[in-house]
Image (tube, coloured by chain):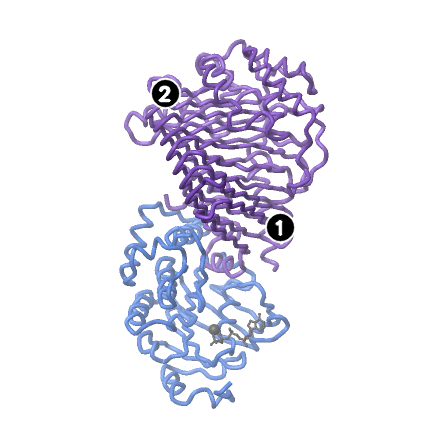
Chain colours: A purple, B blue
Amino acid sequence: MAATTETVEQVRAVTEQKYKYGFTTDIESDVAPKGLNEDIVRFISAKKEEPEWLLEWRLKAFRVWQEMEEPRHWAKLSFPPIDYQDAHYYAAPKMKDRPKSLDEVDPELLKTYEKLGIPLREQEILAGVEGAEGKSPAIAVDAVFDSVSVATTFKAKLEEMGIIFCAISEAVHKCPELVQKYLGSVVPYTDNFYATLNCAVFTDGSFVYIPKGVRCPMELSTYFRINQANTGQFERTLIIADEGSYVSYLEGCTAPQRDENQLHAAVVELVALDDAQIKYSTVQNWYPGNAEGVGGIYNFVTKRGACRGRNSKISWTQVETGSAITWKYPSCILQGDNSVGEFYSVAITNNFQQADTGTKMIHIGKNTRSTIVSKGISAGRAQQTYRGLVKILPKAEGARNHTQCDSLLIGDQCGAHTVPYIENRNRTARVEHEATTAKISEDQLFYCRQRGLSEEDAVSLIVNGFCKEVLKELPMEFAVEAQKLVGISLEGSVG
Amino acid sequence: MIEIKNLHATVDGKEILKGIDLTINPGEVHAIMGPNGSGKSTLSYVLAGRDGYEITEGSVSFFGKDLLEMEPEERAAAGLFLAFQYPVEIPGVANTTFLKSALNAIRKQRGEPELDAMQFLKLVREKTKALSMTDEMLKRAVNVGFSGGEKKRNETLQMAVLQPKFAILDETDSGLDIDALKIVAEGVNALRSPERSMLVITHYQRLLDYIVPDHVHVLAFGKIQRSGGKELALELEKNGYAEFGVNEAA
Ligand SMILES: Nc1ncnc2c1ncn2[C@@H]1O[C@H](COP(=O)(O)OP(=O)(O)OP(=O)(O)O)[C@@H](O)[C@H]1O
Ligand SMILES: [Mg+2]
């Protein structure tokens, strides 16, 4: 057993060193006073120069939220009470106006993204050149720093095709009818405690609209960064794929290393109309806290996609390695006939991290299909729960679901739990569920080490193998980062 | 090259190796034969540095260094290779990925430059061909779903790629069909050189027709009971281990 303990030690040591994103940026900020009340909601709305309807919507949400309770009773998570009055609900890097081009963005901010490996400027130039040769597909980035979107690249090129990719606060002014029509149409403002809070105080996030029949030529990506201390981050993402369109969207996130816990409560809404496809990938690497469980992000996220149209498809792929607490169930509402929902997830918890994550697949239309592949890895004293719901409504003739839930344990102080709920109200539907739990065996570790791999590289290799089915769903650009994250560093993996 | 002196090892308090003495010089091939449960695999595990064995007495020096002080991966980098009696499955990890990671990990430990994807592929293709293995097997997950014989062949491939200085083959012949046995033996013979040594553990003298050993040892009850030339294997084939007090029915 000694080897396993050592492995855990090593994974622990490495994981801590690995959080290389723990720096803060010294930048002047506009910060709202601490606390949460209607005035703060009005303050945020005013800062964003929002139309009346949106302010009213926020206030409705805020009033509902005040009557709601934190959903503590059912999730397998334990954390001290959160004082919602003890946080800032708005923080923005000081800028006179929204920067018109990258030249106007504070160099400190550009440096931050460079450090994170998201060099907004270089990316644009490099990708532009490469894109021109038709080699590597470019990535358009929307960078969100604390509460504000600071830069979006490739906008002009996308606009030529009628694609709208911008900060949601900008979309409110640019295409208000779209925002008003779809905002809250998938996750209503009464949905749940965190989502409702988000409705009241969301500050920024990304907006995407892909017009009819357009295949978005590049990956769209948003990079979220929490910098300001004691700030909650409440971003809101809305993606609409009109008939016959396709988009692949990536989301990445990091935060500085701080001793206090920071709240992150995002909402993501996806809408796919007839024959449209949305592929949404996340690599979540918020600060997880230290080895003793101090600090880290509380990540309470509501992600939901509506397959409204016939033959539409939504895929969620997530690699969750960060956060002290993860509470997240990306879901698909399969409304359109023949629509398809997919959920591919890798969740890694170490030390004192806790994750309660899974998905919901709601089959409404005929011949709707869903696939769930969840890979959970627990090390240290971490606790992880897969919680999934597959619901087949009476009209979902011929619906199909296949669920595969695998857990891998490293050491013997961690836990993995699987809680699948299945509600099938149609006889012609078929639901399959498979679950396995395994440990990294001493034999596997020894075999790898005999071949020259260090123990940590062996763990990394084995874990990457375990997650392969999910990792291969990620876009190439992300897969590399994810592989490194998943293990430690996969020395020279075959490209 | 390797000098084993009075090696005693216990597992869970039970003594399995009871004083092994064995010296292998560069270029030599030694064969170990012995009844089931006599400690052959235990010896190979102890040499490779597997956890769970307590060395109660004795020493092993490898190129003048104290082998027993080294981590398994350091032993690998120093040139020790073990072809497992029971190769381990690693789901989801492609054979090529595994091999490339292993080779580069060893090269890195030795301070040699790592091979890039192209160089590696060239090397591995060459070795794969020599062992009549298919590219398809390279893409598959390490040993997962491999037949017994395929696993053994895969061990040989790893050895051919990693080019160890001292290879222990723990029953690499068992499970191989006649053609495969020849191919694997050729693979092993191709590695024979004045600088390289091998310790071949086997139950069948047939293998030794192909890989002709310089010395043959009989291991029973945790000790080397007798040593001789290749004719000893023939004798064992005929008479069994009765002479060493082993009850054949057991
Ligand atoms: N963990 C363990 N606990 C107790 N006994 C063990 C353990 N591991 C090995 N042994 C015992 O040690 C002895 C030697 O085993 P070993 O695998 O070395 O034999 P072997 O010579 O390789 O046999 P075979 O020819 O069948 O491969 C056996 O009696 C075995 O049961
Ligand atoms: Mg054996």
- Tell me, yes or no, if residue A10 can be seen here: no
User: In the rendered view, would you say B88 is above or below B179?
Assistant: above
Instruction: Say what amino acid the circle numbered 2 marks.
Output: Leu
Instruction: Determine crowd level at label 2: few under 14, some 14-19, many 20+ residues with C-alpha closer than 10 A.
Output: some
Decide if ligand 1 comes within 8 Å of the CB at mark 2: no
User: Disc 2 sits on a residue from what chain?
Assistant: A
Same chain shared by disc 2 and disc 1: yes
Question: Residue A453: x percent and y percent?
Answer: 47, 53
Q: Residue at x 62, y 38 (%)?
A: A325
User: In the rendered view, would you say A27 is above or below A443?
Assistant: above
Residue A160 has which mark? none
Residue A415 has which mark? 1
Residue B214: image quadrant is: bottom left
User: Disc 1 sits on a residue from what chain?
Assistant: A
Question: Residue A483: x percent and y percent?
Answer: 46, 42
Q: Residue at x 38, y 87 (%)?
A: B235
Instruction: Say what amino acid the circle numbered 1 marks.
Output: Gly
Is A3 or A351 nearer to us in this picture? Answer: A351
Residue at the disc numbered 2: A158
- Tell me, yes or no, if residue B207 can be seen here: yes
Count of picture labels = 2
Is A361 or B33 nearer to us in this picture? Answer: A361
Q: Residue at x 44, y 55 (%)?
A: B91
Q: Residue at x 66, y 25 (%)?
A: A65
Could you tell whether A123 is left or right of B246 in the image? left
User: In the rendered view, would you say A210 is above or below A288?
Assistant: above
- Circle 2 sits in a helix, a strand or a loop, which is it? helix
Question: Residue B249: x percent and y percent?
Answer: 49, 87
